[in-house]
Amino acid sequence: MKIWTMGEILVEIMRPKPDIPLGKIGEQFLGPYPSGAPAIFADTVARLGHQSGIIGGVGDDEFGESTIDRLCRNGVDTRLVKRVSGESTAVAFVSYNSTGDRNFIYHIGNTPAAQAQCPDEKDVSSPAPAFFHIMGCSLMADEGFCGEIYKAAELFHNLGAKISFDPNIRTELLRGRNLKEFIAPIMRNCYILQPGYQELCAISGKDNVEDAVCILFENPSLEIIALKLGSNGCHVFTRNKDFPLGVYNIEPVDPTGAGDSFDAGMLCGLLDGMTPFEAAKQASAAAALNTAAFGPMEGDISITNVRKMTGSSDT
């Protein structure tokens, strides 16, 4: 079975150390690094030994070529990545401050990153799709693209895939839209929700985890909530139980993509027949490995390294 995603594919141009503002003239940047939350997710799935595919778009340029080459080398199915002649691959400029917070300047909305369309059933039905994973940032990229992702979510659900949603939505980008209405087409069939704390509260309308989880489980489709808490680890909820999990002891270099790798590790674990707790351990290890290298896809993630970490490290 296969894990699919749909969303932006881009490159990141990054400040090499913290506290260098994006607007500071004459300072160095590093890159281009293959990136985009869905691309990081798909890449991690493939590195964890599962079939993965991505639906997206890049320009017919060197940025697009290098990013697609990275995904293909790691085993991601890129047949449904649209290569658009005469247009440029999406770019994100990134800086950090000493607290770990990030600032971005995105060039996505008018690029091929937001031009992919819902696929034909024949292109994604074999092998059978196990999960279809959606990122909130992809929904925000462009109104038309958001509509295509809605259509794809319905298609994959009808094909038997379980819907996974990481609602990394910035409320300031809603532009007057109601958050619950905006994500309703995804939440309707969502099987596993993988939010951060602020997102959990925003979606539920509650300001504490217990009440938020209770409200969200009123959705009959939802079975698992994997709450990501950054340096405090994660807390996984099912309808019958819940359990907190700490982080693995690793020296972080770059937090970009950690949440995307967590999402991938969680779904791969569930597909392997792990319990949600076991899957969360794998997800946490994948996230930790991703943070140990500079660049959003540069961590040394493999099933061997994940097993070493989960087998020998305390959480």
Image (tube, rainbow, N blue to C red):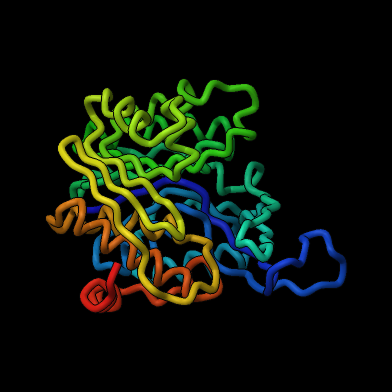
Q: Residue at x 66, y 52 (%)?
A: 87
The reply, left or right, for residue 174 in relation to residue 298 is: right
Q: How far across and down, in percent of the image, does residue 262 sit?
A: 36, 58
Q: Which quadrant would residue 277 be assigned to in this image?
A: bottom left
Task: Tell me if 130 is positioned left or right of 85 in this view.
Answer: left
Residue at the image position 42 percent from the left and 75 percent from the top: 250
Residue at figure coordinates x 52%, y 39% from the top left: 169
Q: Residue, x 31% and y 65% (percent of image)?
A: 46
Is residue 66 something one can see in this rendering? Answer: yes
The quarter of the picture where the C terminus appears is: bottom left
Q: Can you say whether 97 is above or below 135 in the image?
A: below
Horizontal relation, residue 155 to residue 167: left or right: left
Nearest to the observer: residue 234 or residue 292: 234
Instruction: Work out whether residue 80 or residue 28 is closer to the camera in this orientation and state it.
Output: 28
x, y percent for residue 43: 39, 63
Query: Can residue 161 be seen by looking at this rendering?
Result: no
Considering every residue shown, the one lying at the far left of the view is 273
Determine the residue located farthest toward the right in the rendered image: 25
Residue 109 at what x, y percent from top left?
A: 64, 42
**Is residue 124 positioned above or below 156 on the image?**
below
The image position of residue 188, as x and y in percent, is 32, 25
Circle count = 0
Foreground: 63 or 269? 269
Nearest the camera: 217 or 79? 217
